[in-house]
Image: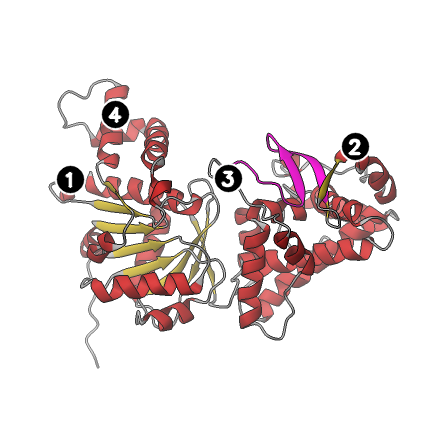
Amino acid sequence: MDEVIIIPENEKTMEYSRRLQNVTVLGAAGKMGSGILLLSALEMADQMLKPENTGKIYVLHAVDLAPAGLSGLLKYLKIQVQKSAEKKVVMLRKIYAGRAGLIENSDIIDAYVDDVMSIVRLSGRTEPAYDSTLIFEAVNENMALKTKLFRQINENNPNQPWFFTNTSSIPISELDEAAALEGRILGFHFYNPPAVQKLVELITIPHNSTDITAFAKTFAVNLRKILVPSNDIAGFIGNGHFMRDALYGIQQAHELSKKMPLVQAVYTINRVTQDFLMRPMGIFQLIDYVGLDVVQFILRVMTSHLPKETLHSELLDELILKGIPGGQFSDGSQKDGFMKYEKGKIVAMIDPETVAYLPLSEIRQQADDIAGELPGNALPWKTLIKSADKDNYLSNYFTLLSMEQTLGARLACDYARNSKSIGLKLIADGVAANKDDVNTVLLTGFFHAYGPINDYI
């Protein structure tokens, strides 16, 4: 019988900290990359400040091949690190107890900010990653680009680095094979924005070692993230549900456009999915938030790997061709998509045929009259998520909703049933292990007040 070697916990801790001594974030200037950079910088600094790591050098390379985007990155980091320090100043007092001259909270906060910022190095080239032992990748959702970067770094890096990709749709096994990484890659899918969102999807492959998966789990725990495992199937759990949910919404709008103008149909489905289903935003607003072009790209990736399904929208294609990409500006403000936004609020809806935005005042009243009123016991999403007896409320709400005869109620019930079917399909197809994982992703990653797989309807 082979001898079982048990690694002591202190050695595991040392290995964890050693792996974090030289880290690179690819795509660091983007919204996802900057958030991952911030979280990595905080965790690395916390490791560096432990007594056992005194004198060890920690370096975090912020790499972006569009170097102009790096210009405001240090300012962003400094502001966010200061906010983090202010929240944990009591803990920092203990850490800095032996450092002379740090008396006031402001002194301690400044010292921590300086320590965190001292770790970060900006670069518009990939060469700094050649020394790293851990690479976080948050570049465009483009397999050719990701593979090129992985190969280039791997061939020039003697440290056998681990690659944590933030891909939201591309199978990890294909990236592993294409870049010849021999299992030194896994999916560590943060949700947007990474510094705020609690969810991370962990996608492993059979070639992963126990060390890389153990590190990923420890890193997630230290970042106070909720880690949900997903099997390595294109789209994973989050986009596996969202993409199909979005396509169903677009399909419903097309069906509804037989009875009303398409612009009114889009408004109605958006209202139904937000107000009647009590979600944080309607499905078309969510598509805008993610970006029409990003949704289109993810659908193409999923279609190429799931040939038995038709995952495509001509409406998305048409709007993108007409210069309507959606998404967000670098400051986080919303670009126009299906809807036009002013100071974060929806003020108009697009007419897909003319590509002109029609004011809500010209759409809302007639469309609302056709859809009908909300059930009397409907709650705003913000109120529902704070409800102490949410389960009983939702059971009663959907019972009443299914008895309503209005168009809005019927559409909402159909949508809820289809959303549940999508969730169950993810389990049946082996993407998710169980309903709790599906529901956790939608509850945590999409801020839904209830999971799609439920007994309410």
Mark 2: few, some, or many residues within 10 Å (few <14, many ≥20)?
few
* Callouts 1 and 2 close, C-beta under 8 Å: no
Task: Tell me the CA gap for discs 4 and 2.
Answer: 50 Å
Disc 4 designates what residue?
110
Q: Which residue is mark 3?
A: 329
Q: Which stretch is magenta?
A: 332-350
Q: Give the percent coordinates (x, y) of residue 383.
A: 65, 34
Q: Name the residue at 34% across, 48% down.
A: 64
Find out whether residue 266 is within the magenta segment.
Answer: no
Query: Residue 281 location, x and y as percent?
Result: 64, 42
Residue type at mark 3: give it.
Phe
Q: In the image, what residue type sits under mark 4?
A: Asp
| Residue with the most extreme bottom position | 1
Residue designated by label 1: 51
How far is the residue under mark 1 from the one under mark 2? 63 Å
Q: Earlier in the sequence, mark 1 or mark 2?
A: 1
Question: Who's the residue at 80% across and 57% down the image?
Answer: 255
Separation of marks 2 and 3 at Cα, in angstroms = 26 Å
